[in-house]
Amino acid sequence: ERENQTLDRLLSTQMSMDQLLLGKWFYMSAVGVLQVGVMFLWAQLVFNVDLVGHLDGFLMMTVVTALAASGFGLFLATLCKTRGQLNGLSVILVLTMSALGGSMVPRYLMSDQLQQYGLWTFNAWALDGYTKVFWRELPVEALAPQLAVLLISGVAFLLAARALAVRWESD
């Protein structure tokens, strides 16, 4: 919005920065839920993943994962001043988080120390949760740690983004 000069127009209306960030957070989260839903629907159709049988755990994990990822995206967007900074920083952080979190190599193949570092990434918690749902077929109650960490991460990233967005309100 800053680059397209729509931020000033949005803030000149009755919309507050809180409303703007919450609207972006919920919109990006809804898109994330839709994207993951399409991926798992494809997995059910092509690879016989039992999505319908695990729908409750899938929905819980998908919603909190999308909230965390969207909060992280907003945090990065408010942290950076230009699109170039955002592109460079996000590529480095996302690739690092993916490597440590188990998206590139399963965490159980990593050393104990790397596995512990991976717990600082929200994608490790998301993968652990999806593993509990689809691989181990554990009950929804077993997802409590993953759901809590992802929800707290999403809210923490959103609050950090809000704190960083103060600079645009004073311009």
Image (spheres, rainbow, N blue to C red):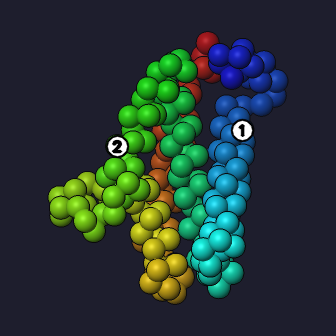
Residue 164 visible from this viewpoint: no
Q: How far from the left and from the top, in percent, is residue 49?
A: 60, 77
SS for dot 1: helix
Name the amino acid, label 1: Gln
Which residue lies at the image location 31% right of the left edge and 52% below the top edge?
A: 100
Q: How dense is the environment of label 1, judged by Cα within 10 Å: few (below 14), some, or many (20 and up)?
A: few
In the picture shown, does residue 98 fall above or below 62? above
Q: How far from the left and from the top, in percent, is residue 115?
A: 25, 61
Q: How far from the left and from the top, in percent, is residue 104?
A: 38, 54
Name the residue tied to disc 1: 19
In the picture shown, does residue 25 fall above or below 138? above
Please give left or right for residue 17 compared with residue 159 in the image: right
Residue 46 visible from this viewpoint: yes
Give the quadrant of residue 73: top right
Work out which quarter of the rendered image holds the C terminus and state it. top right
Q: Furthest residue to the front?
A: 46
Is label 1 or label 2 in front?
Answer: 2
Which residue lies at the image location 65% right of the left edge and 37% below the top edge?
A: 21
Residue closest to the eye, 161 or 170: 161
Name the amino acid, label 2: Thr
Name the residue tied to disc 2: 96
Please give left or right for residue 74 compared with residue 145 in the image: right
Mark 1–mark 2 distance (CA, rounded to whole Å): 31 Å
In the picture shown, does residue 110 fall above or below 69? below
Of marks 1 and 2, which one's residue comes earlier in the chain? 1
In the picture shown, does residue 144 fall above or below 162? below
SS for dot 2: helix
